[in-house]
Amino acid sequence: MASQESQQQTTTIFKDYLPGSSGLPEQDKPVEPTSLWKQTSRAHNLPPGLEYLNQLDRIIIHQQVELLEAILGTETCSKYEIKNHLGQRVYFAVEENGCFDRNLCSPIRSFTIRIADNSGQEVITVNRPLRCSSCWFPCFLQELEVQSPPGTIAGYVVQNWDPFLPKFTIQNESKEDVLKIIGPYATCGCFEDVEFEVKDLNEMSTIGKISKYWSGFVNNVFTNTANFGIQVPVDLDVKIKAVMIGACFLIDLMFFENSLDGL
């Protein structure tokens, strides 16, 4: 009897290790790490106004041509249409700041960009303070805050110091690093698109990109208007998608604000 009980206990303890078993016991199975950038909220828990972003993996941002800016060369508040891959407008964005900021601090100017849906309801607010962008001032580089809904932090875009490449970190609302953005050594993009790669934190895998599309010689020389595309995984957290839109605005102002930079 004692021998049978011992055999039963041994069988019970090692049954999951026997040939033909389903695998390791649950407590011994390796746990797959959850990526911080993946969507974890259910559809009904998404920030209001961002539900549509949940199904998008491509976002197009088109800056509207300002006639006064094109004719007189004065810097005006930027306006953007944010569209899906079919060209249908999803959101509309308007920059707010003072004339002094726009014309004297142009590429590094502070701004607030308010993004509204097609009903006119503001769903995203992007705030950029006046900061440096030069590698000579590594302690005061660019940082941008994205709120969604307005008043609630969705995440941040933080410029990283690098002597050669444009580098940024995407952070969530808790200021935890989520993704990296790395641009090319030269951002002039003469007659071609300029791509900023979206990478995981170890910078080994590319999961998406932000592209500045070539808009033609006349448009790039005589206006500051730009067209951008954002490609990200469809299961990227919608709040991080909103932060990526903010990152696109920051990249536009830092590298493509002056007309000749778009060549």
Image (cartoon, helix red, strand yellow):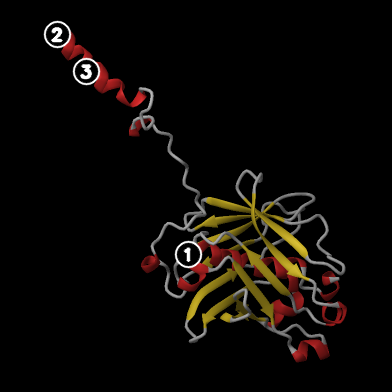
Q: Position of residue 69 (x, y in %)?
A: 77, 87
Instruction: Identify the amino acid type marked 3.
Output: Gln
> What residue is shown with label 3?
9
Q: CA distance from mark 2 to mark 3?
A: 11 Å
In the picture provided, is 43 more to the left or to the right than 98?
A: left
| Residue that numbered label 2 is attached to | 2
Q: Which mark is residue 153?
A: 1
Q: Nearer the viewer, residue 165 or 236?
A: 236
Comparing 60 with 18, the one in front is 18
Q: Which residue occupies the extreme left position in the image?
A: 1
Quarter assignment of residue 96: bottom right
**Rendering quarter of residue 91:** bottom right
SS of the residue at dot 1?
A: strand
Of residues 104 and 48, the one nearer the viewer is 48
Where in the figure is residue 66, as x and y percent of width and height?
A: 73, 88
Cα distance, mark 1 to mark 2? Answer: 65 Å
Q: Amino acid at mark 1?
A: Ile
Cα–Cα gap, marks 1 and 3 = 55 Å
Residue 15 falls in image quadrant: top left
Q: Residue at x 81, y 73 (%)?
A: 258
Give the vertical position of 150 relative to 8 (above or below).
below
The number of numbered badges drawn on the structure is 3
- Dot 3: within a 10 Å radius of its alpha carbon, few (fewer than 14), some, or many (20 or more) residues? few
Q: Residue at x 50, y 51 (%)?
A: 36
